[in-house]
Each structure stands twice: as structure tokens, then as C-alpha cells.
Image (cartoon, rainbow, N blue to C red):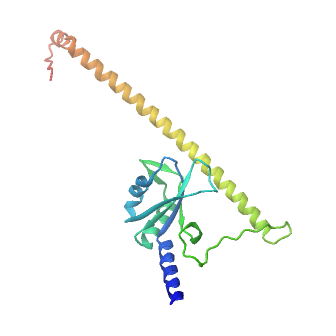
């Protein structure tokens, strides 16, 4: 009976893993409501859990997004793989991957999914593979940093342009208001025989 109960618990856990998406390289400013809003377009977001991200820069974060079913989770992964993730109208270099058992801290006890760590000697057949994985991880981290820096620069340039346009438009409207306030518009209308309305 105990074995059956453990099997059921693990089956339920595996189903949860299948409908969950791992998202990383998120901005530190992103919170649960932002993620629920962003991923709500794919279906019902059941839960959002932020988790430690040891492979990415310290100023980024990762999260597990649990959807209502596995099909919705697959849709997120497919969509983000083919197009940039948008937050507040701006693209972000975010990755979406299928969640794995080891990412959850609520795994049923006595189940698979343990992480094994061991030292590799240079003559070990897996040593080269491990070296390549380390290089690839560093490369991805550097690429993410560069993309983030580019996006921050674009954000600042856009914000500066919008502020300048707003300032320019304000000056134009202020000038128009002043023309009407000091009756300059009426004098010009009389001079060129044009009817001027205060409305």
C-alpha cells in the first residue's frame, strides 16, 4: 500500500514537471504579477516560483512557471524559441526550457532526480565533455550579458527620445497658449484678415 502511494505521488509530481516551464535570464525587476500577465496569454498560470540561478549573472533571476496542462507549457517553449520574449513592450533575451525533476525542492522523497557530483581526472573519457560544457556555459553567460547590455542601452535611448519629444511638444503647446493669451493671434488675424477663435 505504501509503495502504491509513493508511486502515485511521484506520478503526480512528474505530471507537474511536464506542465512546468523553466525561464531564466529574467530582469531583477520582474515579479510574479509580470510573469502571470506575460504567460497568461498561453493559458492558465497555476503557480510561479522563483528559484536560484547559479549559472547566470547575479543580476538575473530564474523561475518555474506551472501551467494548467503540458500543451500550454510546450506552446511557451516553442513560442519563445522562435520569437523574443516581450515584457512591457520590449524584447528580453529570456530562455524557456522544459522543467526538470531536480529543479523542484518539493520532490517526493525516495524518488529519482538526485544530482551526483564527482571530480574528473584529465584522462577520464568524460573530461573533454565536461570542459566543453563549462566553455558553453561561460559563452551563454557572456552572450546573455551582452544582450542585456544592448537592451538596456536601447531602453535608455528610447526613453531619452521620448522625453525629448515630450519636451518639444510641451514647448509647442506652451507657445500656442502664449500666443492666444497675449492676443498675438488676434492681432495677426486682423492683420491678414483671418478669423481667429479662442476655442
Name the residue located 46 percent from the left edge and 68 percent from the top edge. Answer: 73
Q: Residue furthest bottom?
A: 1
Taking 3 as reference, is 112 above or below it? Answer: above
Q: Residue furthest right?
A: 123
Q: Quadrant of the C terminus?
A: top left
Please provide percent x and percent y for residue 93. 54, 52
The answer to whether 92 appears left or right of 34 in the picture is right
Which of 4/129 is in front? 4
Name the residue located 64 percent from the left edge and 55 percent from the top edge. Answer: 140
Please provide percent x and percent y for residue 85. 47, 55
Taking 18 as reference, is 193 above or below it? Answer: above
Number of on-image labels: 0
Which of 109/148 is in front? 109
Please provide percent x and percent y for residue 180. 21, 16
Name the residue located 61 percent from the left edge and 77 percent from the top edge. Answer: 112
Q: Residue furthest front?
A: 2
The image quadrant of residue 100 is: bottom right
Please provide percent x and percent y for residue 186. 17, 12
Name the residue located 76 percent from the left edge and 68 percent from the top edge. Answer: 118
Taking 62 as reference, is 12 above or below it? Answer: below
Amino acid at each position: 500500500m505504501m509503495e502504491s502511494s509513493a508511486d502515485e505521488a511521484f506520478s503526480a509530481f512528474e505530471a507537474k514537471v511536464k506542465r512546468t516551464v523553466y525561464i531564466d535570464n529574467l530582469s531583477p525587476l520582474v515579479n510574479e504579477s509580470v510573469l502571470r500577465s506575460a504567460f497568461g496569454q498561453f493559458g492558465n498560470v497555476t503557480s510561479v516560483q522563483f528559484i536560484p540561478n547559479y549559472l547566470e549573472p547575479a543580476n538575473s533571476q530564474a523561475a518555474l512557471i506551472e501551467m494548467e496542462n503540458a500543451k500550454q507549457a510546450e506552446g511557451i517553449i516553442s513560442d519563445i524559441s522562435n520569437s523574443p520574449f516581450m515584457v512591457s513592450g520590449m524584447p528580453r533575451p529570456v530562455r524557456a526550457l522544459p522543467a526538470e525533476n531536480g529543479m523542484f525542492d518539493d520532490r517526493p522523497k525516495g524518488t529519482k532526480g538526485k544530482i551526483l557530483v564527482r571530480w574528473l581526472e584529465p584522462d577520464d573519457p568524460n573530461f573533454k565533455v565536461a570542459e566543453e560544457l563549462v566553455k558553453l556555459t561561460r559563452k551563454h553567460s557572456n552572450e546573455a550579458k551582452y544582450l542585456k547590455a544592448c537592451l538596456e542601452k536601447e531602453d535608455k535611448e528610447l526613453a531619452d527620445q521620448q522625453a525629448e519629444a515630450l519636451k518639444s511638444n510641451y514647448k509647442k503647446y506652451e507657445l500656442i497658449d502664449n500666443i492666444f493669451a497675449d492676443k498675438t493671434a488676434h492681432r495677426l488675424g486682423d492683420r491678414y484678415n483671418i478669423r481667429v477663435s479662442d476655442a
